[in-house]
Image (cartoon, rainbow, N blue to C red):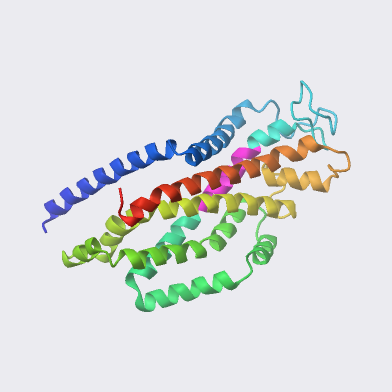
Amino acid sequence: MTARDEDINLILKSASLINRFKDFLKKLIHHRKGLAGIIIIASLVLIAIIGIFFAPYNPFSTNAPAFQPPSKSHILGTDYLGEDVLSWFLIGTGTSLMVGFSIAVLSAIIGVLVGVIAGYFGGQVDNVLMRVVDILLVIPGFPLLVILSAFLPPTLETTIFVLSILSWPFLSRVIRAQTLSLKQRQYILASKLSGLSGLKIISRDIIPNLIPIIFINAIFLAVGGVVAQAGLAFFGLGDLRSVNWGTMLYWFEAEDGIVFNAWWWLLPPGLGIVAFGIGANFLGNAVYELSQPLRSGKQ
């Protein structure tokens, strides 16, 4: 096969992938769970985007009375310092989603690379990588997360780094199993016989067919990242002056929000986390259901 033939094949495959993506997106929008998931997650993303511009107050402004219930001037009331809860929620949504999506992207990149390389090349490469994965899977995740967070600088970047390092092993196992199955397909064997290198086969033939699996797992990695970050913040770990859902929950608990019956302070971050989880669950299930015919070779 000449270099020109390879370029033509690459262009045709790219066009085919784009068309398949468009068709899949149309099916996803017409899927009830998929549409519900898209609407919920898109709404949260929209809040995150506009929140920084439309927050009615500086979140650290303390000019209002403490523990003020919802009113015209403060739609979601105020916290123990008189800070506006709505402003905290609007800006905090962006921070929490940024943490979740960052963790999902970094974890997915590591997990996919490790899983594909281990599954495709096999042998000693597979043995070494999977032993590393086994060790990370055996170690209790949350206690290790707490220990690392306690000794590292208390910043959002540290939280993202630690959670990303601890979140990819399970995905790598899933990707490895799928790669072992894919590399036995006839078109992969044909690519090998045509003289394509392993890296080209991985990038052109294997990873594109793993996109639904990667997407599904990335969605749940994002939810896990949001929940884990909120859990760390709730226990007083991380940057407690960062405006996000986790720190809202921490200050509610630390400053006796429950004693003052400040439900307006607790509900926004709690509902935000729940809504993100529900939206991700709907979207992930829809992608899984729609991808089954594709994986089985049906139309």
The percent coordinates of residue 149 (x first, y second) are 66, 60
The percent coordinates of residue 123 (x first, y second) are 35, 78
Query: Which image quadrant is residue 72 in?
Result: top right
In the displayed structure, would residue 214 be above or below residue 45?
below
Residue positioned 75% across, 55% down in the render: 235
Query: Which image quadrant is residue 6 in?
Result: bottom left
- Report the side of 189 relative to 36 (left or right): left
Which region is colored magenta? 92-105
The percent coordinates of residue 229 (x first, y second) are 64, 52
Residue positioned 64% across, 54% down in the render: 228
Q: How many marks?
A: 0
Does residue 204 show up magenta in the picture?
Answer: no
Residue positioned 30% across, 66% down in the render: 183
- Report the side of 188 relative to 162 (left or right): left
Q: Work out which quarter of the rendered image holds the N terminus and state it.
A: bottom left
Query: Which image quadrant is residue 245 in?
Result: top right
The percent coordinates of residue 63 (x first, y second) are 81, 28
- The residue nearer to you, when weighing 293 against 1, is 293
Residue 238 appears in the rendering: no
Residue positioned 42% across, 55% down in the render: 213
Residue 54 appears in the rendering: yes
- Report the side of 291 relative to 74 (left or right): left
Does residue 98 show up magenta in the picture?
Answer: yes
Residue reaching furthest to the top: 72
- Report the side of 203 relative to 191 (left or right): right
- The residue nearer to you, when weighing 87 against 241, is 87
Our reading of the magenta stretch's main secondary structure is: helix
